[in-house]
Image (cartoon, rainbow, N blue to C red):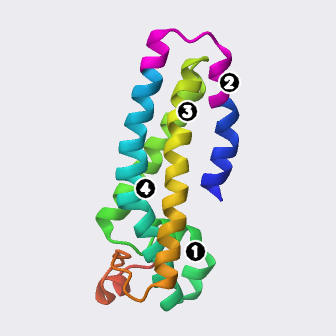
Amino acid sequence: MLIGFTLFRLTPIAIEAFEYELLWYHWAALVSNILFMLYSEAYRGFQKGFSPRVAARCKYLYQNPKALHILLAPLFCIGYFHVLRNRQRHIIALTTAIIILIIVIQRIDQPWRGIIDVGVVVGLSWGLITLFVFAAKAALSEDFDYSPEVPEPNEAEQRLI
């Protein structure tokens, strides 16, 4: 839902960039940004990392329900808790960096903000599609071969969550 809401909010801002007279360097930046976001955010970020991990964690939660994990299911599935320590640090650092980027990009004037947001919209759209695909695979397949990256039982018992 968060990704869908973000797409709903960013798409008009991205489209607004095309109301300006874009010069060759705007178009070059737009194409470069789209290609960069397709590779880094969509392919490497979502398709190779986030989407299969979230789907695996959803399947893990379904097969190993615990009250707190169910109550905080979105946070659990994204990996904010009951996850390997290094992965948790990575997720928190990435979330912090994204929040900082959002704050900075909101201050950029059009058409540059729209040019940036076009790439974000493309990347998030791909990401949302891959999330649905991996979720369907996890739900319908017995041999979904992605790790939920949960701590070993003895390590989890030492942690509060």
Q: Earlier in the sequence, mark 1 or mark 4?
A: 4
Q: Nearer the viewer, residue 121 or 102?
A: 121
Is residue 2 in view?
yes
Q: Marks 4/3: CA distance?
A: 17 Å
Q: Marks 4/2: CA distance?
A: 26 Å
- Judge whether 95 appears above or below 156 on screen: above
Q: Secondary structure at mark 1?
A: helix
Predominant SS of the magenta segment? helix
Q: Position of residue 32 (x, y in %)?
A: 39, 27
Q: Residue at x 54, y 36 (%)?
A: 102
Residue 118 image label: 3
Q: What residue is pinned by disc 1?
A: 73
Q: Marks 1/3: CA distance?
A: 30 Å
Q: Marks 3/2: CA distance?
A: 10 Å
Q: Residue at x 70, y 33 (%)?
A: 12
Q: Earlier in the sequence, mark 1 or mark 3?
A: 1
Q: Position of residue 150 (x, y in %)?
A: 36, 78
Q: Position of residue 108 (x, y in %)?
A: 57, 20
- Residue 33 magenta-highlighted: no
Q: Could you say which quadrant of the image residue 48 lies in?
A: bottom left
Identify which amino acid the numbered label 4 is placed on: Phe
Identify which amino acid the numbered label 1 is placed on: Ala
Camera-side mark, 1 or 3: 3
Q: Earlier in the sequence, mark 3 or mark 2?
A: 2
Q: What residue is pinned by disc 2?
A: 16
Q: What residue is pinned by disc 4?
A: 46
Q: Secondary structure at mark 3?
A: helix
Q: Residue at x 62, y 21 (%)?
A: 17
- Judge whether 70 appears above or below 38 on screen: below
- Judge whether 107 appears above or below 66 on screen: above
